[in-house]
Amino acid sequence: MRHPAATAATVSLGLLAAVGVPGTALASAGGGVFDPRPGSAGIGDRLYPTLGNGGYDAQHYDLDVKYLTGEPSSGIDGSVTMKARATQDLSRFDLDFSGDSVGAVTVNGRKAGFRRDGEDLVITPAKALHRGATFTVTVSHFTATPTEPIPGELLSAVFFITPDGSATSGQPNAMHAVYPSNDHPRDKASFTISMNVPKNETAVANGVLQHKKTRGDRTTWTYEQRQPMATELTQLAAGQFTVIDQGKVNGVPVRDVVPTRLVDEYKSRLAVSRKQIAWMEKRVTKYPFDLYGSLVVDTQLGFALETQTLSLYDTPWWDYPEYVWDPVMNHELAHQWFGDDVAPWEWSDVWLNEGHATWYEQLYAFDQPGYTVGTFDDSMKAEYADANIQRAENGPVAQPRSGDVYDVFNSNVYGGGALVLYALRQKIGTQKFVALERAWVTKYSGKSASTADFIALASKVSGHDQSAFLKDWLYGTTVPPMPGHPDWTATDPGSASAQRSAPSLAPLVKRDARI
């Protein structure tokens, strides 16, 4: 998992800090008490107690990686500099890292002590850090190696090999297998990403390409992700790929990335995101980032993933009919607002990601001629009929049972999350619901927000306290009555005849595959 007796007056403050003895209290130069202690090995996530780290707030990452060869299986040798602000007096702090090795660590340009402890890199600076101080930590010559994804095993490879090159998929708790970081969506930061590859290869990352420089037989591609990003949404793809310029939509550049040999097959299919951006902007707000696009990899991952500004798909998605893969693409686009721009405070809040993405996926599907049967209400009625079975099998919508990936991304956070939104719309009316959706992505743009934050905002926008209503829907073990539909019934999971009444899209797509 990522995570998580000097007393002489002549001894320097830096030496005392390096010792890192909890409770060592000294008068600071600026007044007050300087009391350096270790930052916590874990940010406080219910599902992943050791994931992320405490004691500081990451603000920017400069990530620089070199692909050692042009083979898809090539490992990387990299350095990362994290600029951060100390949120306490720090004698030492952790980064999450489970990659192969680390060469050296400096803090504010000075050599720092470090050791590996499970999936944490424990760092002791030469001089303790004051609360409120901005500092930099550089981890040099870290290494990581891609692996083959295992078909049918969800998220089996974080840094994975394809016939054309390699790419990444670190959600929810594993991007620190690739590079050291504070690997939790609660601590978002901006990024500068430089990738050095053989000159006949293409390197793509999140954000806008700033420059491309070739020296000898190597080329460095540098990208800038200005808006804050959770580490789990990082995309690093390198190999025989082609970048397709699909033009702009309302000022947003659209670039797609596909294996060079598959450009003709995928260029027109991926262009559908142009109409989807316009569709989403009409219903929510302006697209939140500097560009968008899709990355296609020719392997079997078993999921699609909303890596920020560049959603990831494997080629088997296009074995489904258009009325499946087209709405799934809108699902991943919707995540750019819900899950990327507004990230979850902790992973129990994942329904805010997946419930919203499923909501806009289905609304979009019902808005396309010939894609569905029945109505959107029919789909929600079928979801409601299934709700108690879902809760019995997976737990409440906003309370996944464990950090196992199949529990975190259980089907109830998808369809059940969308059902919560439908119930809320029924309760407060369409006009106020749309106002709430727009207020949510505006108020928390670039931030991380919780289920409690959503409940509070729903109460404010609707003009009435929605706490009891939403807590019943989100944390209850049985589904409450549906407002406006007193005739809707939910199947008793204990009955001998209990069978799923599946919504219109469910038979074609495993819910836990639309991450």
Image (cartoon, rainbow, N blue to C red):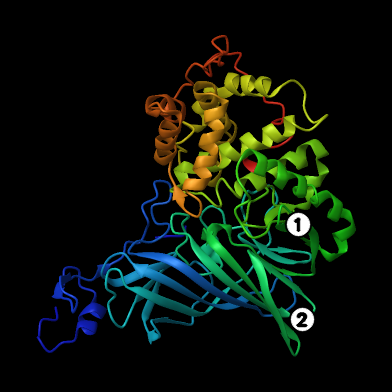
Q: In the image, 343: left or right of 277?
A: left
Residue identifier under label 2: 199
Residue 428's label in the rendered image is: none
Q: Quadrant of residue 57?
A: bottom left
Marks 1/2 in contact by CB < 8 Å: the verdict is no
Residue sitting at the far top: 487
Residue identifier under label 1: 248
Kindly identify the amino acid type of the residue bearing the numbered disc 1: Lys
Q: In the image, 364: left or right of 61?
A: right
Which one is nearer the viewer's eye here, 239 or 107? 107
The residue under the point 56% across, 33% down is 434
Residue 298 visible in the shown view: no
Kindly identify the amino acid type of the residue bearing the numbered disc 2: Lys
Q: In the image, 232: left or right of 127?
A: right
Residue 228 visible in the shown view: yes
**Other residues around mark 1 within 10 Å, as few (<14) / some (14–19) / many (≥20):** few
Compared to residue 142, the image places residue 463 above or below, namely: above
